[in-house]
Amino acid sequence: MRTTRAAAAALLILLAAAAFAAAQPTGSCCNSPGLVPVGQAGEPVFQDLPKSGKKCWIGEVNYFTWEFDKAPKMGTAILIVKLYDKDGHRVSDLTIAGRFDMPEMRGAHDSGEVAFKTNKAGDYLLPVNVVMPGGWEVRLTFSRGGIVIFRGRLTFDV
Ligand SMILES: [Cu+2]
């Protein structure tokens, strides 16, 4: 009796997990559709973004481009993300967060998650503070209604 109840409970948990997994939105980059990937230890995976200025698709509904206001050097560079709907109209209905650090010395200059701000034109802006020469990374997280729909990373050298 006890065993049956335990088995039933376990089955319910499995069903709930399957339903949760099925409900997760899809994300894709550069026309490669798929689920938002999660690493082996359960940590989120940030897929490599295309080069500055190139289109990156988020599912089939949005795409975006990224660029810096100027070539990053020591000091502050502004990372600019422009978001579009599938027809190429500018939109700003997603929330974007950025987190920058040096991958070779992870944690040493970690910005933590910082929300992009939008300007009047609808550009998403993030000041990136470059405090040391070397390799840098910015991780981007796109959300709709509090649900992450896309994660990507870009790198640059100073
Ligand atoms: Cu450093």
Image (spheres, grey):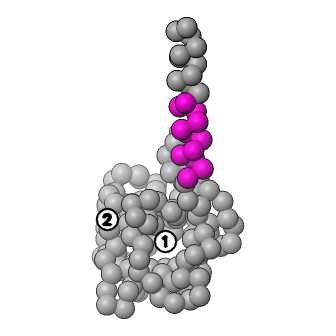
The residue nearer to you, when weighing 32 against 144, is 144
Q: How much space separates mark 2 and mark 1, taking CA atoms? A: 18 Å
- Please state which amino acid type lies under the numbered disc 1: Phe
Q: Which numbered disc flags the more N-terminal residue, 2 or 1?
A: 2
Give the main secondary structure, helix, strand or loop, of the magenta stretch.
helix
Q: Give above or below for 120 relative to 47.
A: below
Residue pointed to by mark 1? 156
Q: Give above or below for 42 relative to 118.
A: above
Query: Along the horizontal axis of the image, is 147 left or right of 48?
Result: left
Q: Quadrant of the N terminus?
A: top right
Query: Along the horizontal axis of the image, is 12 left or right of 91?
Result: right
Are the two marked residues, 2 and 1, in contact with CB atoms closer than 8 angstroms?
no
Q: Residue at x 55, y 52 (%)?
A: 23
Q: Residue at x 52, y 64 (%)?
A: 150
Residue pointed to by mark 2? 114
Q: Residues within 10 Å of mark 2 (few under 14, many from 20)?
A: some
Q: Residue at x 36, y 91 (%)?
A: 121
What are the residue bounds of the magenta stretch?
12-23
Q: Give above or below for 95 relative to 73.
A: above
Q: Quadrant of the C terminus?
A: bottom left
- Please state which amino acid type lies under the numbered disc 2: Val
Residue 38: give x, y in percent of width and height.
Answer: 56, 49
Question: Which SS class for mark 2?
Answer: strand
- Inspect the magenta stretch and tell me whether residue 16 lies in it: yes
